[in-house]
Every structure is written in structure tokens, then in C-alpha cells.
């Protein structure tokens, strides 16, 4: 959460079988980099389960939900809507404006999957590009959230975790929180 502002990520579109991993990674990236929740398309139940499982094991708070009403979620959002697209204004040119605009209003970050209809561009307060080149929507989301939170999300801690990663220069160390 950015101050008192809720930050939600909406995954727009999901092709089962083809987008399962990418949709899951949108949710995991949203969680790890400071968003409060992710809203997935109704047909992304596998991704919902995986993100909820990771949140249960590695902590939250973080919400994951599904909806059939992607367009209505954007259209009826009570706050600021940012659509990440390679065709948008460069993130470095608009990040301050987005961070400061209606700073207490909820922010919805729309991340496309399949082709996004033009109405999404029209309903967004900002259409934002990260490099204006084709690349992964997960990478775009990560860069955008890091810019939005000004790096502070990298130091966040998680409540109610069953497991915790212990940073090391070499190797992998995960401990059960009960072992303390």
C-alpha cells in the first residue's frame, strides 16, 4: 500500500493453458512488489489458487479474487486507473504525476494479457509504457510498481507467514517461522 492508497492490479484477459504461468506471475509480482490485491479473470482459477497458496505460506496481507466483469471493474473504479501498455506515455515522464494524483484515491493498475480493447485505453487515466518496446507484462508491472513506490516496497515485511526466506550471498535458506 502506498500511504493510505490502495493499489490493486487487474489482469485483463487470460487464455487457459497458454497464460496460466504469466497470469500467476502477474499476481505474484503484484504481491511481492507492494500491491494490496490482484483481480484475475474468472477463468484463472489455477492462478488464483497458486497466488493464495504463496500468500498463505510466505505471508500477507494480500488479496486475490476473480471476476467476470473486467470491463465494469475498470469503468466503475472509484479512483485512478493506470493501464500498462507499450503504446503509453513513458513511465519516467508520468510516474510523479501518477504518484501524486489524488494520492488518497485507490489506484487500479491494468495489465493486459490478450489484445486489450480500445475502451480500456479510453477509461484509463494514464496509459503508461515501460520502454515502449514489446516485452513481458510481468516486467512492465515490476518496473511500474517499483517506480510508484519509489523502492520502498523492497523493504516490506509480511505478516502471518509460515515460511521466510533468509537472504544469503550464496545458497538457498528458507525457514519455518515456527522454528524461531
Image (tube, rainbow, N blue to C red):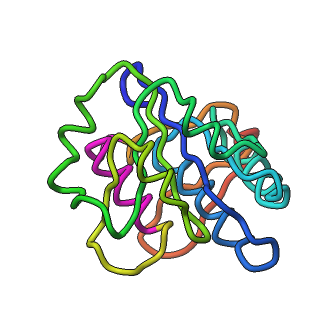
Residue situated in front as seen by the camera: 62 or 18:
18
Q: Quadrant of the N terminus?
A: top left
Is 169 situated above or below 74? below
Residue situated in front as seen by the camera: 10 or 125:
125
For image coordinates 18% across by 40% down, the residue present is 96
For image coordinates 26% across by 72% down, the residue present is 131
Is 7 situated above or below 146? above
Q: Position of residue 125 (x, y in %)?
A: 35, 40
Q: Position of residue 146 (x, y in %)?
A: 33, 51
The magenta stretch spans residue 119: no
Q: Which residues are magenta?
A: 139-152
Residue 119 can be seen in this image = yes
114 on left or right of 15: left
Query: Hey, which quadrant is residue 180 in on the image?
Result: top right
Is 123 situated above or below 61? below
For image coordinates 15% across by 53% down, the residue present is 93
Residue situated in front as seen by the camera: 90 or 158:
90
Q: Position of residue 44 (x, y in %)?
A: 79, 58
The magenta stretch spans residue 146: yes
Residue 66 can be seen in this image = no
29 on left or right of 107: right
In the rendered image, the residue lying farthest to the left is 93
Q: Position of residue 32 (x, y in %)?
A: 52, 50
103 on left or right of 25: left
Magenta region's main secondary structure?
A: helix
For image coordinates 50% across by 66% down, the residue present is 138
Across the whole image, how many numbered discs are drawn on residues? 0
106 on left or right of 40: left
Amino acid at each position: 500500500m502506498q500511504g493510505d492508497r490502495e493499489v490493486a492490479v487487474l489482469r485483463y484477459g487470460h487464455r487457459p493453458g497458454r497464460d496460466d504461468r504469466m497470469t500467476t506471475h502477474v499476481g505474484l509480482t503484484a504481491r511481492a512488489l507492494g500491491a494490496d490485491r490482484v483481480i484475475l479473470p474468472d477463468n484463472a482459477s489455477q492462478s488464483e489458487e497458486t497466488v493464495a497458496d504463496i500468500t498463505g505460506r510466505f505471508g500477507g496481507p494480500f488479496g486475490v479474487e476473480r471476476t467476470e466483469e473486467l470491463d465494469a471493474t475498470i469503468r466503475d473504479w472509484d479512483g485512478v486507473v493506470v493501464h500498462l501498455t507499450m503504446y503509453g506515455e513513458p513511465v519516467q515522464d508520468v510516474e510523479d504525476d501518477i504518484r501524486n494524483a489524488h494520492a488518497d484515491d485507490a489506484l487500479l493498475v491494468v495489465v493486459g494479457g490478450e489484445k486489450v480493447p480500445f475502451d480500456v485505453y479510453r477509461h484509463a487515466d494514464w496509459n503508461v509504457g515501460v520502454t515502449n518496446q514489446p516485452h513481458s507484462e510481468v516486467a512492465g508491472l515490476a518496473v511500474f510498481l517499483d517506480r510508484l513506490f519509489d523502492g520502498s516496497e523492497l523493504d516490506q515485511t509480511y505478516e502471518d507467514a509460515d515460511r521466510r526466506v533468509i537472504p544469503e550471498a550464496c545458497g538457498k535458506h528458507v525457514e519455518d517461522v515456527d522454528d524461531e
